[in-house]
Amino acid sequence: MPDRWHLTLLFLGAVPEETVAPLVTAVGGAVAAAPPMRLRLAGGGRFGSVRRPQVAWAGLEGDVAPLVELAARLAGAARRLRLPVEDRPFRPHLTLGRWRPGQPADGALTDRLAGYRGPAWPVSEVRLYESHLGPRPVYDVLAEWPLTTRTP
């Protein structure tokens, strides 16, 4: 469902209630330093092996360097609030789907996206979500910050 597509810049686990307001402030400062960006979906891949794939994803082209810098600023803001942040490099991608563990899977499926290049779009906003997991996950927007866009 494209209306639910998003690029995860930073995933945080449970955030204590008293830390949410300082987090919103810190994220706002990190986003304010971000330049206008344009991205496009390009290529694809998977997390996991061909024999045991886990996640199918589409890659990104365009203003990826500023996106990576924004993700780093967000991680730094979370660390300053003493929130646990994964210690691995940010890999910008759009998650397309997940394979079910233990089920037959075609891990080479994403190889078909190798030559794909979609239309470019302006990054219009950054949102902070609170997720409620379950059979039908719910994502509540806690805050959002517009990004200034530029013409192609």
Image: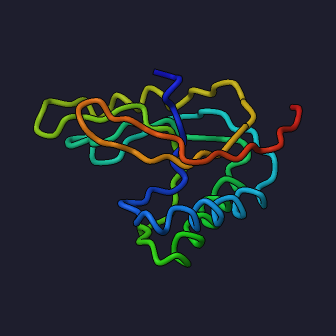
Task: Please state if 46 lies on the left or on the right of 43 as rendered.
Answer: left
* Residue appearing at x 50%, y 46% in the figure: 129
* Residue appearing at x 89%, y 32% in the figure: 151
Q: Nearer the viewer, residue 47 or 141?
A: 141
User: For residue 50, what is the image quadrant?
Assistant: top left
Quadrant of the frame with the C terminus: top right
Extreme-front residue of the structure? 18
- Looking at the picture, how far across and down is residue 17, in whole percent? 43, 63
Query: How many dots with numbers?
Result: 0
User: For residue 100, what is the image quadrant?
Assistant: top left
In the image, residue 43 sits, relative to residue 52, either above or below, namely above
* Residue appearing at x 43%, y 39% in the figure: 45
Extreme-top residue of the structure? 1
Q: Nearer the viewer, residue 114 or 65?
A: 65
- Looking at the picture, how far across and down is residue 1, in whole percent? 45, 21
User: For residue 59, what is the image quadrant?
Assistant: top right
Extreme-right residue of the structure? 151
- Looking at the picture, how far across and down is residue 83, in whole percent? 45, 72
Task: Please state if 13 lies on the left or on the right of 127 as rendered.
Answer: left
In the image, residue 125 sits, relative to residue 89, either above or below, namely above
In the image, residue 151 sits, relative to residue 130, either above or below, namely above
Q: Nearer the viewer, residue 64 or 113?
A: 64
Which colour assignment does the render follow?
Answer: rainbow
- Looking at the picture, how far across and down is residue 32, in whole percent? 77, 57
Task: Please state if 103 lies on the left or on the right of 136 as rendered.
Answer: left
